[in-house]
């Protein structure tokens, strides 16, 4: 008899982490796989030609009033092509009905008015969905709301569940640390496992697997792309040290902790690096702006621009030292053996504590950049650092197979 697996996944980094696992499960003819793709994860599934379902496909599990409620919350239909209007209506309406079931009309209204979708916790809907599909194993990630509700529902139904944790779980530890939350957790590295054990998880409940989204970092194609970039840019033969600054926005306020940020920080770092290479002719700087940054690149001698169309993972293989504040690019660079420098006065430093975890050379202010670059370069091995091929997907699949044994 086939095993019924349900994957529940939001978009962004979460679907990137889940996609390699989905493709491996699809190879197993003894499994029947259903994918509940939420928000932009649906578009990813379509691009990959993978069948998926959404909230709208299970609207029959709830009262028909979800439609009117959803339309009221979503508003008039828009021209958005990423998420269908029907799916948005179903998502909002079904989640709101779940709130009403749990707290009553008045309290549901108060919670939604205060925090919007952040208050959604559709555990009743997920319980019905898991039951209808007769699920044997649930696989999800560390997102709140639908993913969190699905894992909690699986626990209530005594269904085995696996939670893939993408990064450091510093916010999600609130629920990941609960012993009843998921049969197994798959985490990035031993530091994340230690943190979860320190808050109450058992050692055998947390597996260090790595993040499958990063497996492609060490693929032959990615490494070849790095060599191609060096050739195309004329870096192959020179002895100049190449610095990559992967910029990211610094808002006035942190979206969760409400710490005050300095929006000028990204450009101040860039300007400091530009000044450094202007007086240190054995260095060049490559600037890579975040997709959400609206910055006009200013040409300068030995300062180059990396457009978003250029392979980021290939570029990481092509450069020598990477500078970030808290970008995931820093972690990706570390995974292929590149030295990282982090400017640790960002409001996001605590969310990506690279230096505290021994991943980066952390500095407290921009004034320390020049001396730190020189120190790091003095220890730099000019040969390409060779790391074992990442195999997080295989590690996760080992955990999946154990849950079925």
Image (spheres, rainbow, N blue to C red):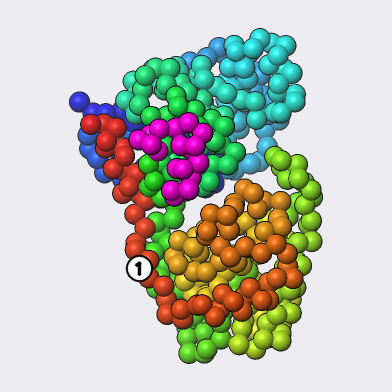
Q: Is residue 31 left or right of residue 213?
A: left
Indicate whether residue 351 is drawn in magenta.
no
The residue that mark 1 highlights is: 220
Q: Position of residue 14 (x, y in %)?
A: 50, 43
Q: The C terminus appears in which quarter of the rendering?
A: top left
Task: From the image, give the main secondary structure of the stretch colored magenta.
Answer: helix
- Looking at the rendering, in which quadrant would you find the N terminus? top left
In this picture, is 339 found above or below 147?
A: below
Label 1's element? helix
Tell me which residue sits at (67%, 33%) in the image. 77
* Left or right: 8 in relation to 324: left
Residue drawn at point x = 42 percent, y = 76 percent: 384
> Residues in magenta?
188-206
Q: Is residue 238 above or below residue 172?
A: below
Q: Dot 1: few (<14), some (14–19), or many (≥20) neighbours within 10 Å?
A: few
Horizontal relation, residue 278 to residue 288: left or right = right
In the rendered view, tell whether residue 168 sits above or below residue 386. above
> Residue 171 falls in which quadrant of the image?
top right
Return the x and y of residue 320 as percentages of the image width and height.
Answer: 52, 75
């Amino acid at each position: 008899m086939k095993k019924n697996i349900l994957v529940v996944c939001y978009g962004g980094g979460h679907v990137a982490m889940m996609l390699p696992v989905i493709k491996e499960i699809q190879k197993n003819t003894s499994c029947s796989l259903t994918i509940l793709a939420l928000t932009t994860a649906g578009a990813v599934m379509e691009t990959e030609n993978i069948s998926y379902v959404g909230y709208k496909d299970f609207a029959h599990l709830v009262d028909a009033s979800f439609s009117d409620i959803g339309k009221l919350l979503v508003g008039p239909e828009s021209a958005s092509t990423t998420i269908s209007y029907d799916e948005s209506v179903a998502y909002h309406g079904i989640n709101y009905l779940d709130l009403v079931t749990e707290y009553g009309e008045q309290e549901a209204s108060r919670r939604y008015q205060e925090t919007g979708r952040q208050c959604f916790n559709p555990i009743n809907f997920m319980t019905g969905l898991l039951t209808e599909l007769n699920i044997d194993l649930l696989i999800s990630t560390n997102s709140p709301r639908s993913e969190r509700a699905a894992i909690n529902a699986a626990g209530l139904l005594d269904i085995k569940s696996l939670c893939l944790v993408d990064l450091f779980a510093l916010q999600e530890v609130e629920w990941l640390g609960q012993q009843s939350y998921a049969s197994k957790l798959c985490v990035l590295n031993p530091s994340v496992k230690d943190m979860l054990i320190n808050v109450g998880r058992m050692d055998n409940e947390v597996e260090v697997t790595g993040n499958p989204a990063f497996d492609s970092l060490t693929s032959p194609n990615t490494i070849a792309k790095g060599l191609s970039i060096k050739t195309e840019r004329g870096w192959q033969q020179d002895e100049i040290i190449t610095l990559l600054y992967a910029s990211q926005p610094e808002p006035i306020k942190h979206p969760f902790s409400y710490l005050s940020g300095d929006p000028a920080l990204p450009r101040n770092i860039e300007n400091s690096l530009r000044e450094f290479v202007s007086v240190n002719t054995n260095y060049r700087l490559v600037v890579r702006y975040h997709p959400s940054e609206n910055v006009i690149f200013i040409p300068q001698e030995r300062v180059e621009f990396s457009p978003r169309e250029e392979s980021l993972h290939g570029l990481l293989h092509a450069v020598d030292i990477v500078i970030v504040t808290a970008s995931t690019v820093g972690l990706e660079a570390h995974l292929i053996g590149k030295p990282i420098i982090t400017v640790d006065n960002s409001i996001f430093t605590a969310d990506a504590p690279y230096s505290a975890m021994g991943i980066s050379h952390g500095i407290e202010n921009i004034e320390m950049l020049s001396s730190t670059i020189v120190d790091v370069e003095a220890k730099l091995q000019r040969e390409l650092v060779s790391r074992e091929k990442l195999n997080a997907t295989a590690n996760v699949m080992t955990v999946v197979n154990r849950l079925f044994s």
